[in-house]
Image: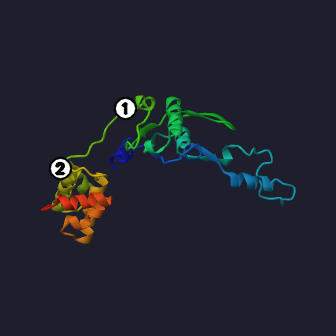
Amino acid sequence: MGKTEVAKALAGATGARLIRLQCHEGIDLHHALYDWDYPRQLLHLRVQSPESPSGDTLPPDEPLYSERFLLRRPLLEALQASEPVVLLIDEIDRADDEFEAFLLEFLSDFQVSIPELGTVVAERRPVVVVTSNRTRELHDALKRRCLYHWIDYPSPEREAEIVRARLPGVPDEIAARVCAAVARLRAEQLYKLPGVGETIAWAQALLALDAAELNETLGVVLKVREDIDRVRERGVLHGA
């Protein structure tokens, strides 16, 4: 949650437009850069055919591969934006090496080549935030082009402030109690440590369910059965 919020906060502070590209396994240029509106292109061909009734048609010399039929994906949208933009490339580690190599070229020159239209150069370079969950190592060439910043877990006190900011009116006792419990969980050797987002969700659950025992709502903050079993067996939250 914290990594994405950096881009949102930066856009909010600078008055820029936030454009987000969510990376995933198998992402390619058609998802990230551009694609063609094939249904509209087909319709254009049909209305220009001799058998088609006259009426609402496009200019007869309108090429099939023109701006009219271009579908802009986040990267191209960021390049062509005339206003200030913060481009969030989220969870780049989920994409494959080939896409990362393309992204390296994109971030070096802030221009792309569309075979049918030519080269598109950024009108004004966007501010780019690239996030990673370290599910795999990124190439050094990409990291050399970035200012690296590690977002660590906040202290319980700071996390309680975040919970109160996100959940106005939450009792201080619940915020402090949940954050202290999360700090205990993060000290354990768990498969998936809870983030700040889980802390906020846990506080919400306690409010909504009026639950007194944290162990009763462990499923809100821990998402792996082995982690839940370990915490309960070791009595990590006993007395919390």
Q: CA distance from mark 2 to mark 1?
A: 28 Å
User: Which residue appears at 35% of the width and 34% of the height?
Assistant: 148
Res 47 label: none
Helix, strand or loop status at disc 2: helix
| Percent of width and height locating residue 212 | 18, 69
Q: Position of residue 211 (x, y in %)?
A: 21, 70
Mark 2, residues whose alpha carbon is within 10 Å: few (<14), some, or many (≥20)? Answer: few
Check the image and report above or below for 130 versus 164: above
Residue hosting label 1: 147
Residue 47 picture quarter: bottom right
Q: What's the residue at 78%, 48% (across, down)?
A: 59
Q: 122 above or below 236?
A: above
Mark 2 touches mark 1? (CB < 8 Å): no
Residue 114 appears in the rendering: yes
Q: Position of residue 181 (x, y in %)?
A: 19, 56
Residue at the disc numbered 2: 157
Q: How is the image coloured?
A: rainbow
Side of 131 where 211 appears, left or right = left
Front position in the image: 131 or 238: 238
- 216 and 109: which is toward the camera: 216
Q: Nearer the viewer, residue 119 or 223?
A: 223
Say which quadrant the C terminus sits in: bottom left
Residue 31 vertical placement versus 221 (above, below): above
Type of the residue with mark 2: Glu
Q: Earlier in the sequence, mark 2 or mark 1?
A: 1
The location of residue 239, given as percent across then percent down, is 12, 62
Residue located farthest toward the left when viewing the structure as drawn: 239
177 sits left or right of 190 in the view: left
Circle 1: residue type: Leu
